């Protein structure tokens, strides 16, 4: 394990701040705790007991509303020690430090209440309580007093609570900033002598990942995590038990479980679900029932006796560690210890599940084949390559959503192209995809640096593509798999190439399993890629692949994966061969296929295989997908039953209020002109109409004579108040779709359409609402402006730098709240100083004409059309200047 | 008294009202939408139903109002508008409601892929959130009515001169982060975005004025003002 690496403080820096280093920590711990078994050993022997609530006990002793409980570590150490001591007397084997809310957002680096002092005092208080308890036993005397005192566990759990912020993209805290916040607490707590790290009350798997990584990378203590689930078994951010356990176990926690949010009764169902999937000891720390407040104080509805009664049931169900959370007291713990102390401890059996996850769902790779969409990959796709060069993320995101709509379970993500920064691009695409698609991702790259960056910020337990039998590959990839907790695709090739026989591939698979085990990676986290080469060059190739699949299943009891489409390379009508081979591969044990879910032939193989293999009870899914089709086999409408945006549209057309009032998006009147289809916002029809016009006319005349007039008409209607925002945008989208058709044509004919100029758009620092800015972007792009979209929460410096680099004539800024207008003002001021030629237009809910003038903007735009008009005005001015200068300003 | 509720599915939609409210937020001001937009509105409500996980929490605290100074136990502030709203109340309810992160995910998805749908969804989720708040309000009214207490119109930080700074105290006292998942950004915006905090005064006497809706608000040029 690597210790003390990562960004931020180095051990040297921290020692300079007067802290002990890791070596000192280990020596210290070793000398004091030599005689005590570690927490992970003890939990194997018997039920282990954690302590209970802290907050309510502090309130009872005078903590005021709004007062930070952690300050009491320093101002009232005697009270903290007393509470810890009471828990030890009650029978707790563990005491949790009072550091739930201790982080760098709330406590500074200096002063009497610095974070370092707060955390150190918290651990010192726990240690003092443990020592007092031992002394108490010795002083009381009696038989074996010395032995009993020495046997006091008193494990000190360093508490890491949530940061109180939501992580990006939904909130404003960066993943790495969350990591750094936790890292700081871990370093202080580990030096001070904590015995393990307890990340608890985590309601977001992504934040839990930051905390666990910070602990694993910056100390060598065991790390445990407990999450807060609601009564439906969901995290507040949408994850479920299966996805959360996959994530936590992947990240290498020693124990996991549930705390807070619910009482013990409601937690039983969550526990049952956890026990079904978990392979590590399980912790259950419930609240004392459900809360209510009386005169500003929170009270809970079940007493110690009732609590202990339910905890006994929980112990019998199989929980390994029992404790309490909000509202529980030493009395609750004492009752629980009394009832459960002599229960037999049974640790969860290791589960042979191959599982990956997204932020919200787990995908099990087992008997039913898993479909991995292959389309996010530039190989052989000139449009995709161009999208990468143009940084056109929307194109890539659409590829993802389309595959999901067609039934993919996982998306492969490969953005490797020699001329781009693959690591940066992969990180960005993974971040974007995981914020709009809830499928697990397969990180596909041969660049180890890119792989690590993507694995680090991935929100879940990923598939990793790939490792192979070469020593160099295994030495580079396995440490990443172990650290970030993925399932890895293992290609059966090595230094000698691809074996021609199945026997040769099996040998490599065995070697890979062996080497992986040395890194602590289990066979269940490896998918053996049996490799398929094109059958056109080797007529036995398919048979070799199929034999390998069978033997991995039957002899090695492993899981398999294939890039199915390779089989047909060089052949005509590749889909025919691909689909037949796919069926054969599934029949020979294939567990996961990297394939094209947009191919109807492939999906037919999949649904038929499931129906024929007892994987689709009563052929329910097959009938749901194909039941509506009559006559000959065309492309089915609603594949996969996932019902994406477009399919839902189609299925809902003609219902309710829409009936009888002209063409909705579901009914695209076949004879509408391009002009009319744009005015009415009909995307598909606009594309068709553009195609129909093309043979007879050139693209530019279609744009200038049909499309621009249509957009103008809609724009004028919007300004007059007869056309509303949704229609304006639907027209814009229809126009954009038609532009796409014309753009393809122009790239073939070499026609060029002059762009009007570049405009920077940004939502200002502190503001995370970007819908207004995005509306303006859609409109400006329609009117042929090149928009440089800097996104949301953008610092003034970033805007200024981009304005200088691109020498743009116009910047558009958006702010939603009064609290963020000051950063708009700051951005304008900086632009005036650094890029004085730039005009600034502003918009947003709180702005007015006067307000905009006060903060120094050139123009207040009340809506998107006003932005277009002002942009035209500015660019016309620029063009005039250029004419006068006889050159360009660049 | 306090309570926490969570739910999400099984909501009975009154589609007519949903559509009407959504269009109001979109600025239609009573005009009719065309068929394409109507379809979009209905599609958005269908998706909202699966994406939203409504969670709410409320707690009651002692209250004192002296002049424009308000002491609500967990926050203190000076606000003319809020003081007027709370005059005569001895207790106050703090309330937080959120549609959850799922709605924000959906908004983000369509912001990238189909802006027309994103703006309709934005309006629909605002209407949905308001509808949830009204529902909670109604049940609180019934609950407190039995004890002889009357509810004042709910009032949120940011209304009139009620400072957004009070968000911190309200959310902290409600433990909103772990109970309903609402967090604050540095600039005091709530995340997830489809969230509401509000205070509701409790008094022994009913208030005889039409303070519901937009009547009391001084922002008379608001595009969404209800007449």
Image (cartoon, coloured by chain):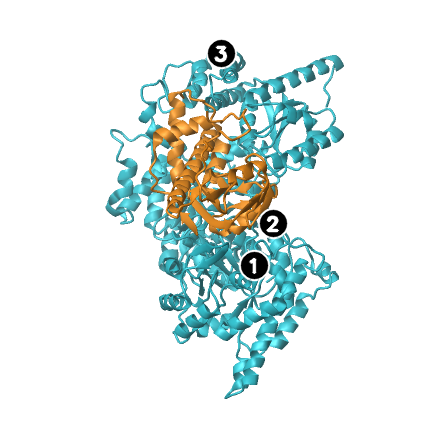
Q: Residue B149 versus residue B172: which sits nearer the camera?
A: B149
- What chain is tagged by disc 3? A
Q: Quadrant of the C terminus of chain A?
A: top right
Quadrant the N terminus of chain A occupies: bottom right
**Inter-mark Cα distance, 1 to 2:** 20 Å
Name the secondary structure under disc 3: loop
Q: Would residue A113 be found to the left or right of residue A683 on screen?
A: right
Disc marking residue A176: 2
- Residue B223 vertical position relative to residue A293 in the rendered view, above or below: above
Near mark 1 (Cα within 10 A), the count class, few <14, some 14-19 or many ≥20, is many
Q: Which chain is orange?
A: B
Residue A87, above or below A728: below
Q: Please say if the residues under marks 1 and 2 sit with CB atoms less than 8 Å apart.
A: no
Instruction: Classify residue A18 by image quadrant.
Output: bottom right
Q: Which mark is drawn over residue A697?
A: 3
In the rendered image, residue A750, in percent from the top left (x then y), is placed at: 56, 19
- Please tell me the colour of chain A: cyan
- The mark that comes first in sequence, 3 or 2, is 2
Q: Position of residue A875 (x, y in %)?
A: 65, 18
Tag 1 and tag 3 share a subunit? yes
- Percent x, y for residue A783? 56, 19
Furthest residue toward bottom: A143
The answer to whether the residues at label 3 and label 2 have Cβ atoms under 8 Å apart is no
Name the residue carrying label 1. Answer: A100
Please report whichever mark, 1 or 2, sits nearer to the chain's N-terminal start: 1
Quadrant in which residue A477 is drawn: bottom right
């Amino acid at each position: 394990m690597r210790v003390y690496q990562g960004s931020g403080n180095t051990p040297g820096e921290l020692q300079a701040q007067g802290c002990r280093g890791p070596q000192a920590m280990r020596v210290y711990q070793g000398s004091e705790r030599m005689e005590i078994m570690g927490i992970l050993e003890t939990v194997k022997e018997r039920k282990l007991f954690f302590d209970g609530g802290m907050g309510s006990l502090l309130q009872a002793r005078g903590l005021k509303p709004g007062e930070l409980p952690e300050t009491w570590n320093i101002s009232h150490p005697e009270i903290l020690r007393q509470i810890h001591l009471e828990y030890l007397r009650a029978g707790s084997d563990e005491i949790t430090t009072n550091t739930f809310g201790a982080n760098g957002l709330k406590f500074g680096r200096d002063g009497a209440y610095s974070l370092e002092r707060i955390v150190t005092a918290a651990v010192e208080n726990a240690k003092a309580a443990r020592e007092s308890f031992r002394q108490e036993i010795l002083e009381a005397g009696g038989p074996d007093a010395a032995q009993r005192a020495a046997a006091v566990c008193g494990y000190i759990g360093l508490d890491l609570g949530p940061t109180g912020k939501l992580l990006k993209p939904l909130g404003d805290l960066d993943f790495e900033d969350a990591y750094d916040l936790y890292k700081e607490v871990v370093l202080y707590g580990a030096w001070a002598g904590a015995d393990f790290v307890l990340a608890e009350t985590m309601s977001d798997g992504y934040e839990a990942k930051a905390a666990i990584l910070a602990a694993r990378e910056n100390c060598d203590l065991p790390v445990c995590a407990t999450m807060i689930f609601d009564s439906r078994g969901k995290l507040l951010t949408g994850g479920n038990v299966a996805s959360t356990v996959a994530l936590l176990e992947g990240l290498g926690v020693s124990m996991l479980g549930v705390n807070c949010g619910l009482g013990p009764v409601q937690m039983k169902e969550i526990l049952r679900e956890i026990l079904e999937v978990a392979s590590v000891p399980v912790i259950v720390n419930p609240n004392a029932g459900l809360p209510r407040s009386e005169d500003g104080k929170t009270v809970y509805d079940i007493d110690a006796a009732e609590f202990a009664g339910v905890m006994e049931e929980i112990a019998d169900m199989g929980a390994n560690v029992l404790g309490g959370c909000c509202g529980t007291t030493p009395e609750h713990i004492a009752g629980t210890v009394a009832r459960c102390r002599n229960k037999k401890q049974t640790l969860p059996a290791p589960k042979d599940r191959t599982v990956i996850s997204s932020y919200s769902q787990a995908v099990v790779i087992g008997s039913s084949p898993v479909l991995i969409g292959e389309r996010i990959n530039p190989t052989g796709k000139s449009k995709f390559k161009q999208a990468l060069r143009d940084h056109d993320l929307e194109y890539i995101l659409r590829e993802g959503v389309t595959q999901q709509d067609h039934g993919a379970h996982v998306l492969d993500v490969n953005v490797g192209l020699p001329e781009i920064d693959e690591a940066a691009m992969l990180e960005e695409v993974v971040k974007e995809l995981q914020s709009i698609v809830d499928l697990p991702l397969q990180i596909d790259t041969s660049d180890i640096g890119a792989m690590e960056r993507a694995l680090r910020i991935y929100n879940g337990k990923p598939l990793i593509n790939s490792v192979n039998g070469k020593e160099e590959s295994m030495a580079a990839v396995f440490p990443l798999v172990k650290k970030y907790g993925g399932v890895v695709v293992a290609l059966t090739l090595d230094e000698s190439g691809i074996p021609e026989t199945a026997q040769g591939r099996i040998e490599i698979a065995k070697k890979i399993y062996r080497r992986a085990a040395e890194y602590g990676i289990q066979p269940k986290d490896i998918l053996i890629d049996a490799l398929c080469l094109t059958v056109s060059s080797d007529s036995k190739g398919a048979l070799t692949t199929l034999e390998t699949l069978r033997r991995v299943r039957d002899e090695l009891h492993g899981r398999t994966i294939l890039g199915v489409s390779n089989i047909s390379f060089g052949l005509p009508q590749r889909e025919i061969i691909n689909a037949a081979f796919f069926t054969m591969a599934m029949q020979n044990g294939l567990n996961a296929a990297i394939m094209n879910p947009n191919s109807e032939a492939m999906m037919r193989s999949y649904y038929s295989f499931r129906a024929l293999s007892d994987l689709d009870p009563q052929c329910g899914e097959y009938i749901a997908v194909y039941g509506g089709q009559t006559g000959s086999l065309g492309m089915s409408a609603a594949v996969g039953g996932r019902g994406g945006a477009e399919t839902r549209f189609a299925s809902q057309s003609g219902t309710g209020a829409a009936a009888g009032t002209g063409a909705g998006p579901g009914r695209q009147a076949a004879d509408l002109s391009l002009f009319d289809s744009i005015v009415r916002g009909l995307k598909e029809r606009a594309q068709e109409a553009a195609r129909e016009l093309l043979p007879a006319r050139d693209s530019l005349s279609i744009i200038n004579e049909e499309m621009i007039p249509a957009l103008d008409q809609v724009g004028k209607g919007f300004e007059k108040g007869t056309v509303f925002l949704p229609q304006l945008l639907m027209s814009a989208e229809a126009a954009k779709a038609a532009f796409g058709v014309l753009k393809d044509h122009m790239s073939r004919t070499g026609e060029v359409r002059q762009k009007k100029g570049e405009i920077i758009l940004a939502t200002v620092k502190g503001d995370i609402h970007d819908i207004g800015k995005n509306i303006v972007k859609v409109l400006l792009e329609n009117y042929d402006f090149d928009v440089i979209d800097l996104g949301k929460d953008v610092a003034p410096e970033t805007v200024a730098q981009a304005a200088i680099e691109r020498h743009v004539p116009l910047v558009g800024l958006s702010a939603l709240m009064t609290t963020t207008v000051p950063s708009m003002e700051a951005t304008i001021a900086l632009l005036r100083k650094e890029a004085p030629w730039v005009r600034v237009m502003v918009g947003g809910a709180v702005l007015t004409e006067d307000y905009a003038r006060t903060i120094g903007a050139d123009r207040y735009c009340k809506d998107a059309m006003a932005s277009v008009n002002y942009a035209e005005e500015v660019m016309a001015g620029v063009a005039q200047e250029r004419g006068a200068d006889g050159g360009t300003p660049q | 008294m306090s309570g926490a509720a969570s739910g999400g599915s099984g909501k009975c939609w009154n589609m007519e009202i949903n559509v009407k409210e959504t269009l109001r937020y979109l600025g239609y001001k009573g005009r009719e939408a065309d068929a394409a937009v109507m379809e979009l509105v209905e599609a958005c409500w269908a998706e909202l139903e699966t994406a939203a996980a409504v969670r709410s929490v409320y707690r009651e605290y002692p209250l004192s109002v002296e002049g424009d100074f308000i002491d609500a136990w967990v926050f203190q502030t000076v606000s003319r508008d809020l003081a007027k709203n709370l005059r005569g109340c001895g207790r106050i309810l703090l309330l937080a409601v959120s549609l959850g992160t799922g709605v924000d995910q959906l908004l983000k998805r369509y912001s990238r892929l189909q802006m027309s749908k994103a703006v309709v969804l934005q309006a629909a989720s605002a209407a949905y959130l308001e509808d949830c708040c009204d529902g909670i309000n109604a049940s609180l009214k019934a609950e407190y009515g039995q004890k002889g207490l009357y509810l004042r119109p709910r009032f949120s930080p940011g209304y009139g001169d009620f400072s957004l700074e009070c968000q911190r105290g309200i959310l902290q006292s409600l433990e909103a982060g772990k109970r309903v998942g609402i967090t604050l950004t540095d600039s005091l915006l709530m995340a997830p975005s489809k969230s509401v905090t509000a205070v509701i005064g409790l008094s022994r006497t009913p208030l005889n004025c039409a303070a519901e809706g937009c009547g009391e608000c001084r922002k008379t040029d608001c595009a969404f003002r209800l007449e």
